[in-house]
Image (cartoon, grey):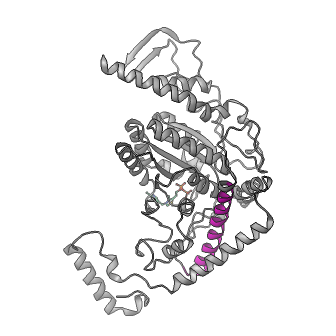
């Protein structure tokens, strides 16, 4: 009895917070945002909804908090339910109905997308957002330009054969930078691979990015990883690991550990729409919900997972609805709107830390570049589609219009910034190209305190092979 009362009072405290926060999370949707001007329904619609017919939703309210959420969503039709028959099933009370109703696979309307700025950089009427001042606004814009410039130069450098591989963030600069801006440096980040803007925001230098891509002695990973697998302990940024979605359950563990240590910080993890098809995504979501871990999942729904379009990736209304299935708060946000991303992540962070709970953010965006330098996306998607997102829905241009309207930015500053970043990058590349490569032994050390016999054997064998085939071994790697 005592533990039941304790649990109940915890739920009530929770609801108090919930009401406050739900206003923010769902408030904008309850007004007119179904018709947000940033998402025209004409031309290309990569985020198409499958035909929605009129389902009657079966109500299953596990906790009171989820019940109030359902009320706010105004989806619930309980007119036919028989309220006399409510029974305590494992997990909570459930009402009976005499109707045999299956839950529809899709809701009548797609979950609306929270936005603050329209494509012209104007504030959308009645938008509910966290204020961004001049210093923050200008830094956000400058870092988005830096990321854009870094991408175009590194892409060319790869094409010239000076680095082996690269992926760009083109089209996803706002998700990268604005989410980073809303976090605290103490928050632990576990990235996928298309989020180096978070590291840039945290102070990883252009020189450090270049050192990593060239895999020289100054690379923190000692040249052991492919380009773009950045990581920095100092910046609380876990090293990128290629196997998709492995970072998600790890982030839940990191978040749980922050909670146990009583830290005022959360874990933040990123993933693409393709990553949500991995078992790790689902394990992480459930794990986070039941362990009440302060973790923010930021899912970049950019329309494509290499050549797989979202229509072939899942049949749900995107990703945001999956949060509800696992008992996790969620919001769908315009990922090309820096102010909307900033507001959503800022609020999610407060909720995650204060209430010790996970939050899911689905950022609708678009991968404008090829998947990587090993891909040619014109083989599987229309050039018009790419152009539309590159021009009409460009997140960098949109924020520029806003900072200009505020009188915080001018053409002169724009020219100076772009030319200065270019020069810094060209210089950084020259420096990195003249630096030595890590020695051969670095392939084998650092994992074990004492190198085990199997690794010793492998090292011996490699050295012997190099002796036999010296021409096949790169001359710039010290033996
Ligand atoms: C477990 C695993 N399966 C497959 C791959 C190959 N792979 C690399 S990236 C990628 C697509 C990921 O798409 P998404 O998560 O949507 O991210 P995006 O590249 O669009 O940002 C795939 C299938 C991998 N790295 N790991």
Q: Would you place residue 286 above or below residue 372 in this image?
A: above
Residue at the image point whose x is 46% and y is 22% from the top: 12
Can residue 55 be seen in this snapshot?
no
In the rendered image, the quadrant that contains the N terminus is top left
x%, y% of residue 153? Answer: 63, 74
Q: Is residue 46 magenta?
A: no
Q: Which residues are magenta?
A: 137-162
Q: Would you place residue 328 above or below residue 368 in this image?
A: above
Q: Is residue 223 left or right of residue 154?
A: left
What is the quadrant of residue 112 in the picture?
top right
What is the quadrant of residue 159 in the picture?
bottom right
In the rendered image, the quadrant that contains the C terminus is bottom left
Q: Would you place residue 425 above or below residue 336 in this image?
A: below
Q: Would you place residue 376 above or below residue 313 in this image?
A: below
Residue at the image point whose x is 49% and y is 48% from the top: 276
Q: Is residue 114 left or right of residue 454?
A: right
Main SS class of the magenta portion in the image: helix
Residue at the image point whose x is 35% and y is 82% from the top: 440
Q: Is residue 153 magenta?
A: yes
């Amino acid at each position: 009895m005592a533990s039941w009362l304790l649990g109940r009072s915890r739920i009530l405290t929770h609801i108090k917070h919930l009401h406050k926060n739900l206003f923010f999370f769902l408030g904008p949707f309850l007004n007119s945002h179904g018709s947000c001007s940033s998402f025209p329904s004409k031309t290309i619609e990569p985020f198409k909804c499958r035909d929605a017919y009129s389902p009657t939703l079966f109500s299953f309210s596990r906790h009171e908090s989820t019940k109030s959420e359902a009320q706010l969503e105004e989806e619930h039709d309980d007119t036919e339910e028989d309220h006399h028959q409510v029974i305590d099933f494992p997990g909570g009370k459930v009402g009976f109905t005499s109707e045999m109703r299956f839950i529809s696979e899709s809701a009548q309307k797609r979950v609306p997308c929270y936005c603050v700025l329209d494509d012209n950089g104007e504030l959308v009427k009645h938008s509910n957002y966290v204020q961004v001042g001049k210093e923050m606004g200008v830094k956000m814009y400058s870092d988005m330009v830096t990321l854009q410039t870094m991408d175009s130069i590194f892409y060319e450098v790869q094409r010239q054969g000076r680095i082996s591989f690269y992926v760009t963030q083109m089209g996803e600069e706002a998700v990268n930078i604005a989410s980073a801006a809303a976090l605290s440096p103490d928050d632990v980040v576990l990235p996928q691979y298309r989020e180096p803007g978070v590291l840039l925001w945290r102070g990883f230098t252009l020189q450090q990015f270049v050192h990593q891509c060239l895999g020289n002695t100054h690379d923190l990973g000692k040249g052991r990883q492919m380009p773009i697998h950045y990581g920095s302990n100092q910046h609380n940024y876990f090293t990128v690991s290629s196997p998709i979605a492995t970072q998600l359950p790890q982030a839940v563990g990191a978040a749980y550990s922050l909670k146990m240590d009583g830290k005022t910080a959360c874990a933040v993890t990123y993933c693409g729409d393709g990553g949500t098809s991995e078992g790790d995504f689902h394990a992480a979501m459930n794990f986070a919900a039941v362990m009440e871990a302060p973790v923010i999942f930021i899912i970049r729904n950019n329309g494509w997972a290499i050549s797989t379009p979202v229509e072939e990736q899942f049949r749900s209304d995107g990703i945001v609805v999956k949060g509800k299935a696992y008992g996790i708060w969620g919001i769908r946000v315009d990922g090309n709107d820096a102010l909307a991303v900033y507001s959503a992540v800022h609020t999610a962070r407060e909720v995650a830390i204060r209430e010790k709970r996970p939050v899911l953010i689905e950022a609708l965006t678009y991968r404008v570049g090829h998947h990587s330098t090993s891909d040619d996306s014109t083989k599987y998607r229309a050039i018009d589609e790419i152009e539309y997102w590159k021009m009409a829905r460009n997140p960098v241009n949109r924020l520029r219009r806003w900072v200009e309207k505020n009188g915080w930015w001018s053409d002169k500053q724009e020219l100076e910034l772009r030319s200065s970043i270019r020069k810094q990058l060209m210089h950084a590349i020259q420096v990195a190209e003249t630096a030595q490569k890590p020695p051969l032994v670095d392939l084998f050390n650092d994992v074990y305190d004492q190198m085990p016999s199997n690794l010793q054997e492998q090292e011996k064998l490699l050295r012997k092979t190099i002796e036999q085939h010296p021409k096949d071994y790169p001359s710039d790697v010290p033996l």
